[in-house]
Amino acid sequence: MNRGGSSAAWAWMLAIGLGLMSLRACDRPPGPVDGPGPSAEGLPAFPAPDAPGQDFAAPPETRAIELANGLRIHEGQIAQSLREAGHAETWMSFGWLLGDQTVTTVAPGLDRRHHFANAYLVGYVPFEGVEAWVPLASLAQRKTYAYDHDQYPGAPELWQTSREAFFYPQGDCEDHAIALADWLIGLGLDARVVLGRLRDDGHAWVVVMDGARTYLLEATHKRPGRALPLASQLPDYRPEAMFNRESYWVNTGTPLTTDYTGGAWALRSGFHRD
């Protein structure tokens, strides 16, 4: 699958470095997460999936990233490199480096295997034809906030796919963000999961691009309204990287920005599910 040839791909793998992302198991939920959620009046009752699914049942070679030079790297190669580096059972997310540039994020799933960040957006859409505020309100009612280290003893960080996030009643920031972004993408919106910091703590959230406007959705907020806030009004969110189902971008400028569309955002890799 490596267009640059097997020897070139292997040389690249030997040259990579691993960097722990600033996302540290979502150190703290933003704001209160207890108490009653939004009113259920007018909110449809969306059924949960019957099972958590087997979203990673296909061989790891079927999930790959492609760089600008055409080089493709699949999850099987990622797993081998992690084993050789002694990180096969390091349950944290990694920034995957080529030289000194992050080209993607790799994170462990509930299956205790590491996957590309994009792979967690599996196309799960509980219900179509709803307004953008409905997924946020529904997720707030359905899912409670819980730290990964409390849910999974010995594992400080495990990610849920969007389907798993709607099946399991608890999750932390990236679980909420992945579930929300995937549903919004299924509604035809340009939604992305953002990894970065909320003030001083590692965090994940969602942005939605709508022409000249960018909205920021706090998926862990348990009292959302129907009005979606503009990202320009939320400077405490400090983005470092973002992804959707197909692409991964890195903020090459200052994280003290509310701009998610400018020239500082570099497209570093594309994701393919064969």
Image (tube, rainbow, N blue to C red):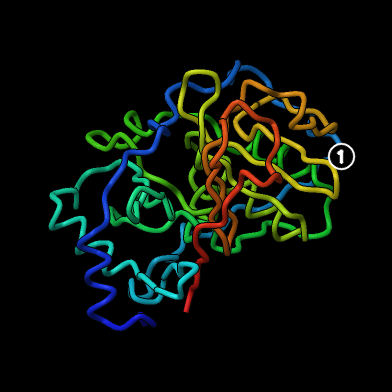
- The amino acid type, in three-letter code, at marker 1 is Gly
**Toward the viewer: 62 or 183?**
62
In front of the other: 249 or 122: 249
Residue at horizontal 41 percent and vertical 29 percent from the top: 147
Figure disc tally: 1
Q: Quadrant of residue 187?
A: bottom right
Q: Which residue is mark 1?
A: 42
Q: Position of residue 148 (x, y in %)?
A: 37, 34
Residue at the spot 60% in from the left edge and 63% down from the top edge: 123
Point 70% across, 44% down: residue: 262
Q: Is residue 189 above or below residue 39?
A: below
**Whether residue 184 is situated above or below residue 204 in the rendered picture:** below
Q: Disc 1 on helix, strand or loop?
A: loop
- The answer to which quarter of the image holds residue 231 is top right
- Residue 173 percent across, percent down from the top left: 51, 34
Judged left or right of residue 32, residue 127 is right
Q: Position of residue 108 (x, y in %)?
A: 33, 50
